[in-house]
Amino acid sequence: MVLRMLVDENIPGAEHVLGPFGRVQRFSGRSLTRSQLVDTDALLVRSVTTVNESLLSGTPVRFVGSATSGIDHIDVSYLHNSGIHFAYAGGANANSVVEYVLSAIASVDDRLERLLAGEACGIVGYGFVGKALAMRFHALGIACRVYDPWLDRDDVSGAVDLEEALACNVVCLHPALTDKAPYPSRHLLNRDTLPLLQPGALLINASRGEVIDSLALLAHLKAGNDLLTVLDVWEDEPHINIALLKQVTLATPHIAGYSLDSKIVATHMLASAMAMARGISELAPHHATEGQAPWVLADGLSGAALIRALVHAHYDVREDDRRLRGGGSDRISEHFDYMRKNYPARRELALARIKLPAGFSDLATLHALGCEIYEGEASSG
Ligand SMILES: NC(=O)C1=CN([C@@H]2O[C@H](COP(=O)(O)OP(=O)(O)OC[C@H]3O[C@@H](n4cnc5c(N)ncnc54)[C@H](O)[C@@H]3O)[C@@H](O)[C@H]2O)C=CC1
Ligand SMILES: O=C(O)C(=O)[C@H](O)COP(=O)(O)O
């Protein structure tokens, strides 16, 4: 049977990877309605589409895939109880988020140097992203204090309670969004917990906007608390709070996980799941992203300077911040989505090939960042 697939317009590679299953039609994620699903067998969404009974009941949809790691937009119990297959791309973009966080840390004063000198980083949420971040930090020699109350403490390296994680000078939020007791993450940072952050701390949120009570954060920042903030995610996207945008240190339109590499992996993960659900063993050949051109490292870099140079050469979060603010306040929601839809092909540093200058000595840092050493000739500098 030819499968009728409806695929979010922002899932790249779908025609190539999913084409062999049948017909691929595109839709716009924020405006999907039930009437568009009357002749759809498989629905592939991103985080902006709420998938629940009111969208799916009475439709022929039998497979739902989400090209995301967070699945708070999916009513998984409804899908399960209705016999609808569900798959998502858990972990596909974890490294992309890790590199976003590194880029943010490397952009704010001497935060990176201080972490390398022994200050600890607080990580809230120890799933694919939190764990990948902790492992990258560990490889770089940076200590982590991790809070994830849903996990057995023995399974969490550097487990602490929330107060201790928030007492670090850099705090990174990576919990799933949940309302579930006893540890809901919605508004985990609120008017009672924001004061637990240290003066001068850097708070990075690349999870879901609703993990922070934005009005409480705005009040906290306006009260002159010495807090630096990097927000990739916002409450009520794309209608973000302009007053908050003006107060934060760096602001981006929910693109931390948007490396090209991670998006293609996500498409493949959904295709594999769809194949399995249909009992098909042969998939389309991997739609590999092109290898990156070797990058020639400048002389004399090591430690923090080396990390900063490599991270920013690959992805500089300050450029996304400039572009978001450059859209002006009057049409910010359109601009927010425009940036997401037209996001440039960002490649991951962990897949980069680096040509070393003569006498280079800091191989440990290159390995910690996941880079490959390139031995051949390279043309660019
Ligand atoms: N900004 C972006 O582009 C991206 C955002 N995300 C968001 O980041 C979240 C984390 O991503 P993954 O690690 O891949 O998800 P995951 O599902 O692997 O991990 C989420 C972790 O959060 C923990 N958690 C839940 N409630 C918590 C609480 N109250 N306090 C502390 N921890 C709590 C869970 O126990 C779990 O270990 C996703 O759920 C998604 O919402 C993920 C990828 C990209
Ligand atoms: O994976 C997740 O979870 C994310 O937040 C996505 O990377 C964000 O992308 P969209 O699904 O919002 O386009």
Image: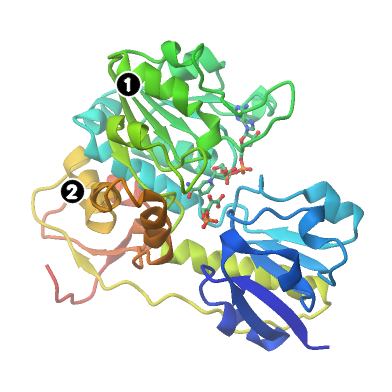
- Residue under the image location 37 percent in, 59 percent down: 339
Mark 1 falls on what kind of element? Answer: loop
Instruction: Identify the residue at image location x=73%, y=68%.
Output: 273
Q: Does the residue labelled 1 lie within 8 Å of ligand 1?
A: no
Task: Say the numbered circle drawn on residue 119.
Answer: 1
Q: Which amino acid does label 1 sit on?
A: Glu
Left or right of residue 196, residue 296 in this image: left
The image shows residue 322 at horizontal and vertical percentages of 23, 49
Taking 329 as reference, is 40 left or right? right
Q: Distance between the residues labelled 1 and 2?
A: 24 Å
Marked residue nearer the N-terminal end (1 or 2): 1
Residue 364 or 200: which is nearer the viewer? 200
Q: In this view, does 202 lie above or below 347?
A: above
x and y percentages locating residue 271 in the rendered image: 67, 73
In the drawing, does residue 210 fall left or right of residue 309? Answer: right
Q: Is residue 363 visible?
A: no
Identify the image quadrant of the C terminus: bottom left
Q: Is residue 55 visible?
A: yes
Q: What residue type is labelled 2?
A: Ser
Q: Which of 157 and 254 is in front in this view?
A: 254
Q: 339 above or below 256?
A: below
The location of residue 31, given as percent across then percent down, is 60, 62
Q: Name the residue under label 2.
A: 361
Residue at the limit of the structure toward the front, as seen here: 330
Expressed as whole percent of the image width and height from the top left, the position of residue 41 reads 79, 75
The answer to whether residue 83 is left or right of residue 365 is right
